[in-house]
Image (spheres, rainbow, N blue to C red):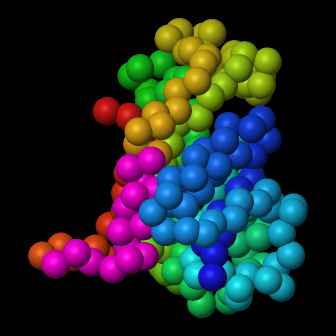
Amino acid sequence: MPILILYASTHGSTAEIAERISSRIASQLPPTEVHALNDIDTSSLSNYTAIILGSAIHGAAWLPEASNFLTANKNALNAKPFFMFSVGAPETMPKWLRGRWARSEKRRIRERVEGVLGGKVKGEGFFSGKLDKGDAPGWLRCCCGLVGGGRYGDFRKWDAIEAWADEVVGILKGPVEGEGAGEGESQRGLTE
């Protein structure tokens, strides 16, 4: 059975990350399928080996379609190995704020997902996305202008994204002798 990668994306960055995760996993543990959340028939969720759900972060939360999907399909998601990834924009923030912002977003989203699923997350990825000035909400443009140091651009770290996909494969294949890959141990992601 294939591995399903689902995503919610507004400007395409999260969709591209989902495609890269799928490609990396498929090279080691085929097959995979990638779908936008609005393109999936939820009655088919039982046809997959594992499910990976990712979303862009807006306002320190997943997009509504990802949160709604999570809540509406929690039983199906709990019946499979479930992984999650989030794509945020802390790299656009002034340097002094980036780490705090990233930790705060990551904690809030993890608590929300684990609250809905009862802590049944096998692994979590947290990645920077890309932000074009025209895509930034007004409050962010204003904030970056007022406090200085804000920036726009593509901050995706493809090597970290691929390394996280490798961790997912490792968890799905099972622990290697001498290693203890267990729930919650996949924590690859954001900035140094």
Overall secondary structure of the magenta section: helix
> Residue 36 lies in what quarter of the image?
bottom right
Left or right of 3? Residue 43 is right
Does the stretch in magenta take in 169?
yes
In the displayed structure, 56 sits above or below 136; it is: below
Please indicate, yes or no, whether residue 191 appears anywhere in the rendered image: yes
**Which of the pair 26/7 is nearer the observer?**
26
In the displayed structure, 16 sits above or below 31; it is: above
In the displayed structure, 182 sits above or below 43; it is: above
Q: Please name the residue shown 38% across and 77% down the image.
A: 173
Q: Position of residue 151 (x, y in %)?
A: 57, 15
Which residue is most to the left?
178
**Which of the pair 56/154 is nearer the observer?**
154
Q: Please name the residue shown 87% across and 63% down the image.
A: 39
In the displayed structure, 78 sits above or below 188; it is: below
Left or right of 191? Residue 46 is right
Q: Please name the residue shown 70% across and 88% down the image.
A: 46
> Residue 16 lies in what quarter of the image?
top right
What is the tally of numbered marks visible in this picture? 0
Q: Where is residue 21 in the image (x, y as percent from the top left)?
A: 55, 53
> Residue 38 lies in what quarter of the image?
bottom right
Please indicate, yes or no, whether residue 61 appears anywhere in the rendered image: no
**Which of the pair 173/189 is nearer the observer?**
173
**Boundaries of the magenta span:** 162-177
Does the stretch in magenta take in 159?
no
Q: Please name the residue shown 47% across and 45% down the image.
A: 161
Q: Where is residue 166 in the image (x, y as percent from the top left)?
A: 40, 58
Tell me the quarter of the image containing the N terminus.
Answer: bottom right
Tell me the quarter of the image containing the C terminus.
Answer: top left
Q: Where is residue 44 in the image (x, y as percent from the top left)?
A: 79, 83
